[in-house]
Image (cartoon, grey):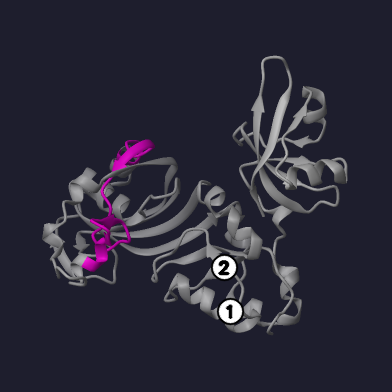
Amino acid sequence: MQNSQQIDGLLAVNKPAGMVSKDVSRWLMRRIGKVKLGHVGTLDPAAAGVLPVLLGRATRLQDFLLEMPKSYEFDVAFGIETDTLDQDGQIVAESEWDHISAPALERAIKSFLGEIEQVPPIYSAVKYQGKPLYDYVRGKGKSGAAASVVPLAELKRRVTVTNFEMLRFKPGSGTFRITCSKGTYVRSLVRDLAYAVDSCATLTRLVRTQAAGIAIEDSLSPESIDADLTKFSDLVVPISKIKLNLSVWRCSTPTLGGRLKNGQKLVLDHNQFEESLDVNKDSARDAVLLVDEGGIAFGVGCVRRHESGSVELVMKRGL
């Protein structure tokens, strides 16, 4: 299906393991034609699960969706560590694992809840001196530098883990579930969890179970998308229905929407503003999704509240 009609919204793809995230975009373009696409966070080739793909005007919401938490389920093998921190790499360390118990892991898990510091894997897209780390280890670029020249400890970042639980444990391995902020590397978490119980480990399976408010049960395999491309547009979540961490402000008249689209500032009294607001309790107070009287999202608005009770509203980004 080469679709000449503009499609704007979110397609929740259940990416299979072995497929690169960019391959999903290429795969889609071969079916629906040339359209602006963007991912809400990439997945490693070996990982599977929810890969939200934004189409058309919805790509302008990418940064808002990236800020939303993601959830993963993953398997760990204790006693070995690879250079990639997953099963695709070469073994670089081995250690005893038979002393590891479920209670010990449960205690260690608690230390990773909340805001933590994390050193990224050397095989990652994190930049150092303008190049992704994987370029160093593969010898790419002008310098052809080895991984040893990269000060990984200086690249540590702060991430947030809101939920971390062990689902199953048997000697030498375990299955875990996590909910975390953007920028969190599960491979690094596996490494650090193993160090906390005096061992080493590698990631053997990774499935993203939620991203951009989409659960894996609501995502679509490439095969199911291919099944009937004539109904492709029905599979796309329209912009106004995308689960954003934004409250929604609905224009009650075409005049209000027109003024906002033309860059004019609205000054409203508190009640007038609140009557048209669908509140998202997790959203910031200074930004809203703007929706016209027909239910079509057309922009992101900046909100400024005054002590007098009046509210200023202006569109800061069109869709």
For residue 90: magenta?
Answer: no
SS state under label 1: helix
Q: Is residue 270 above or below residue 21?
A: above
User: Residue 300: which quarter of the image?
Assistant: top right
Q: At label 2, which amino acid type do we have?
A: Leu
Circles 1 and 2, Cβ within 8 Å, touching? The answer is yes
Look at 26% across and 66% down and name the residue there: 134
The tag on residue 137 is none
Observer-nearest of 244 and 105 = 244
* Residue 21 screen position, x and y as percent: 46, 70
**Residue 130 placement (x, y as % from top left):** 27, 58
- Identify the image quadrant of residue 74: bottom left
Residue 129 on the magenta segment: yes
Determine crowd level at label 1: few under 14, some 14-19, many 20+ residues with C-alpha closer than 10 A.
some
For the point 61% across and 36% down, the residue is 283
- Residue at (80% x, 45% y) in the render: 257
Kindly identify which residue carries mark 1: 29
Span highlighted in magenta in the image: 108-135
Other-residue count near label 2 (Cα within 10 Å), few / some / many at <14 / 14–19 / ≥20: many
The image shows residue 5 at horizontal and vertical percentages of 74, 75
User: Of residues 13 and 139, which is closer to you in this image?
Assistant: 139
Residue 312 lies left or right of residue 162; in this view the side is right
Mark 2 = which residue? Answer: 37
State how far apart marks 1 and 2 are (Cα).
Answer: 9 Å
